[in-house]
Amino acid sequence: MHTTHKNKKISIIIIPDSGGKTRTYTISQFGARVLMGVFICIIGGTGLLIFEYGNMIEKSLKIKALNSENEEMREKYAKLELFTQEFNELKDRTNKIANLLGVRQTSEQSSPKVAISFSSKNQIPSKIISSSPEITSSTSQVISRSSVILPNSLTSKEKAEQSLIPSIYPTKGWVTQKFSPTHNGIDFAAELGTPVFSTMSGTVIFTGWDEIFGNIIKITNKKWFKTVYGHLAGISVVKGLHINKGDLIGFVGSTGKSSAPHLHYEVWLNGVLQDPERYLILKEVR
C-alpha cells in the first residue's frame, strides 16, 4: 500500500501480490480525519463496553455473595428462634414443676432447682415385641415404668402429692390434635401396640368398651383428677386396681371411631374438663 499527498488529498494505491490490476482510492484529508475519528470512536466504544461488562460481572458476583450471606443469616435467625422456643418451653415446664411441688420462686430465682430424670433400665423399647389379643382386661399384673425422681429435700408426703398430678405424657408419639372447644382432649399418633402409661397415681374406675373411643380406661384419685385413655388395642389393668404414676395400663390402638392408630387422652378436675397440656411437664415419654 502506497500513500501520496496531492492537492490536499490522500491517494491509497492497492497493488495485489498476484500481479493483478492495481487499484487507486483517493480521499480528502478531511475525509481521512473523519474515518480516523470513526475508527477511534469504535475502538473507544468497544473498550467502554468491555469495561462496563467487567463492572456488571463484578456487581453480579457481589450480589451473589450478599445473597449467600443473607441466606446464612436467615438460617442463623431460624436457629435462634428455635433455641428461643425451646428455652421458653423449658422455662414453662420448670414453672409447672415449681407449681406442682409448691416451690416459691423469687425475683432472683428464675427457676427452681428441681431434678427430674428417668432410670435407663425401664425405658420403653423402640419396638413392641407383641401386641397380641392375650393382653386383655383380665390381665391383673401391672408392669411398672420408671418413676419421677424428686429431690431428697422433698418429704414422702410431697412426693405422694406430686404423683397425683397427671404431669407425664401417656405414650410415645406426636400430637395430631390438641384440646379445643370441639375436642375434649389430646390425640397422640403412634404405632399400633405402643405402650400407654398412667399419667398419675390413682384407682381404675372403668375399663371396657365405648361406642366412640373403643377400648377405654378411666382412672381417678383423691385429688379429684380423672384421666381417660381411648382407642386402645389392649388393656392391661382391671377395674378397682390401684396403680402408680408411670404404670403400664394398655396399648395404642384404633378401636371405636378411629381412622388410624392413636391415643385419645383427657383430663378432668372436679368434674370439669381440662386442657391436659396445662399439667404436662415432660416433653415426651422416654
Image: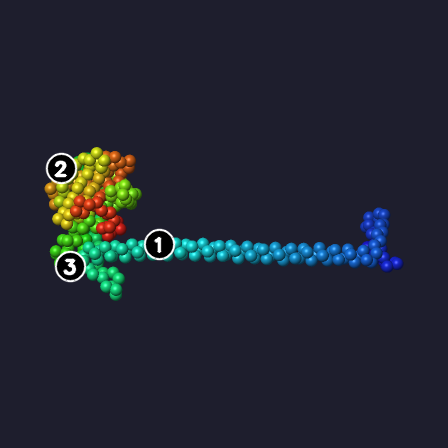
| Mark 2 or 1, closer to the camera | 1
Label 2 to label 3, Cα distance in Å?
Answer: 37 Å
Q: Quadrant of the N terminus?
A: bottom right
The answer to whether residue 66 of the structure is visible from this angle is: yes
| Mark 2 or 3, closer to the camera | 3
Specify whether 75 is left or right of 233: right
What is the crowding at mark 3: few (fewer than 14 residues within 10 Å), some, or many (at least 20)? few
Tell me which corner region of the image, top left, top right, bottom left or bottom right, holds residue 216.
top left
Q: Please give the name of the residue rendered at 12% of the width and 43% of the height, measured from the top-left corner.
A: 241
Q: Please give the name of the residue rendered at 14% of the width and 53% of the height, measured from the top-left corner.
A: 160
For disc 3, the marked residue is 154
Q: Nearer the viewer, residue 228 or 113?
A: 228
For disc 2, the marked residue is 138
User: Which amino acid is tagged 2?
Assistant: Ser
Q: Please give the name of the residue rendered at 52% of the width and 55% of the height, measured from the top-left corner.
A: 63
For disc 1, the marked residue is 82
Q: Nearer the viewer, residue 176 or 63?
A: 176
Asked if marks 1 and 3 touch (Cβ < 8 Å), the reply is no
Label 1 to label 3, Cα distance in Å?
Answer: 34 Å
The secondary element bearing badge 3 is classed as loop
The answer to whether residue 143 of the structure is visible from this angle is: no
